[in-house]
Amino acid sequence: MLIRFGFRESLLYPSLFVLFLAIRRIIKYFLEIHLLKLKLSYILVLIMFIFEIVIGLFCLYHRKKKNNSPVTSEFMGIPLTKQVDVLKRPDSNLKVVILIILASYFEIIGAISRRYLTNNNTNNESNLYDEYHARYRSSEIILASLLCLFTLKLKIYRHHIFSLIVILICLIIVFITESICGLDNLAYFLLILVSSICRVYLDTIEKYLFEVDFVDIYKITIFEGIVDTIFTSFIYFFNGPKDELIKLVKLPKENGTDMFKYWGGILLLIVYGIFSGLKNINRRYTVKSFSPMTRALAESILDPIFIIYGYIKNNNESNEKGIISFIITLICSFIMVFCSCIYNEIFVLYCFGLERKTHLFISHTNSNLELAGNDKNANASFEDDMERDSVI
């Protein structure tokens, strides 16, 4: 078989991350289009960070309450394991705090850059970011791979190199196609790049804190939520976020305002905050249990859907150039998602040696060696082959 499913660990965290991500975007759509009929970009950012604190505190309290129970406690299917305090951190508390603040900085800059893109477009489309970012989101797996290579010293093997090269080629094709068809915007592209870099740095810093300094996920969620909430409060000194908040407060006083929809919208804002907190908890579990590249894959899974939705919604692209750009972009999007799955060993290609150094191949080979009687020469030959297959 040329392609095999490389299932090796529970995909609970990435699956929940994708689920909550999709639910949040659906809630945002109903809030802005059907209920409140207002852009809520900056308000949603503030709510997201506030509920990071709330959900983090709830999970921490729930774990402490069950701390003496012999039965493993779970919340939303996530095991609330006890924090290991006996392990000595190699870094000082000051360095850990600085890294957490730096991670918070990248999170808030990424969030603001995405909201700026949403609120500053000529088409006045509230979901422009999702549709536009979907075309280039797979660049995050390239950026994350390079950053993890130089900072966390994660090795890159043949199937990784193959995936990254194909993804890079697809990104170049999409950019050239969109530029030729006159559908691209350099300023938006640069904002997407800034947002992607911030996401990658956020994931990599948190991965370091989890793996090296054994920082508790719920504690870092609470701390980052507090820092981000403080940072976010300062943006309301600017006209855009301030006007957004004023419009929401004054909405009940406007003639013709449906109060049922208004209070329904307020309730849905709270629900959005809850799912945002759950999403960010599962994002951190995905980064800790897997890698920043797996987080990038989980988020890019929905990209083809956003590309199709964006094409259907934007009637102004219903011309020959728009159709050509849509087809090429959609095909490249599917290829990039597939290659991201190869990178993360969700799929394993058994050709050109791409299967070597994957978990599935190593597991099967070790099993065969054990059946063969643990032949020392065979084991030595296998280890030599694995070492030669290391690309970086």
Image (spheres, rainbow, N blue to C red):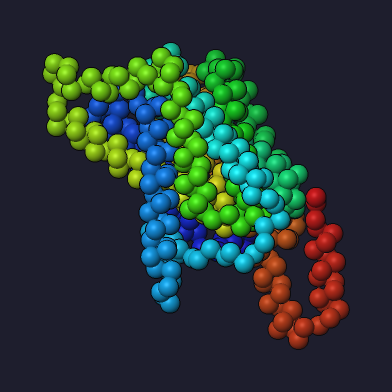
Relative vertical location of residue 70 with respect to residue 36 in this rendering, above or below? below
Q: Nearer the viewer, residue 168 or 219?
A: 219
Quadrant of image for the N terminus: bottom right
Q: Residue at x 45, y 64 (%)?
A: 79
Relative vertical location of residue 101 with respect to residue 121 in this rendering, above or below? below
Relative vertical location of residue 389 with respect to residue 148 in this rendering, above or below? below
Q: Nearer the viewer, residue 121 or 67?
A: 67
Q: Residue at x 13, y 18 (%)?
A: 256
Q: Nearer the viewer, residue 226 or 380?
A: 226
Q: Position of residue 297 (x, y in %)?
A: 55, 46
Q: Position of residue 87 (x, y in %)?
A: 64, 64
Examine the rendering and report whether any part of residue 245 can be seen: yes
Q: Residue at x 54, y 21 (%)?
A: 188
Q: Position of residue 281 (x, y in %)?
A: 46, 50
Q: Position of residue 284 (x, y in %)?
A: 52, 50
Left or right, 305 with reference to 207: left
Q: Nearer the viewer, residue 27 or 158?
A: 27
Left or right, 179 with reference to 27: right
Q: Residue at x 43, y 57 (%)?
A: 60
Relative vertical location of residue 284 with respect to residue 140 in this rendering, above or below? below
Examine the rendering and report whether any part of residue 315 can be seen: no
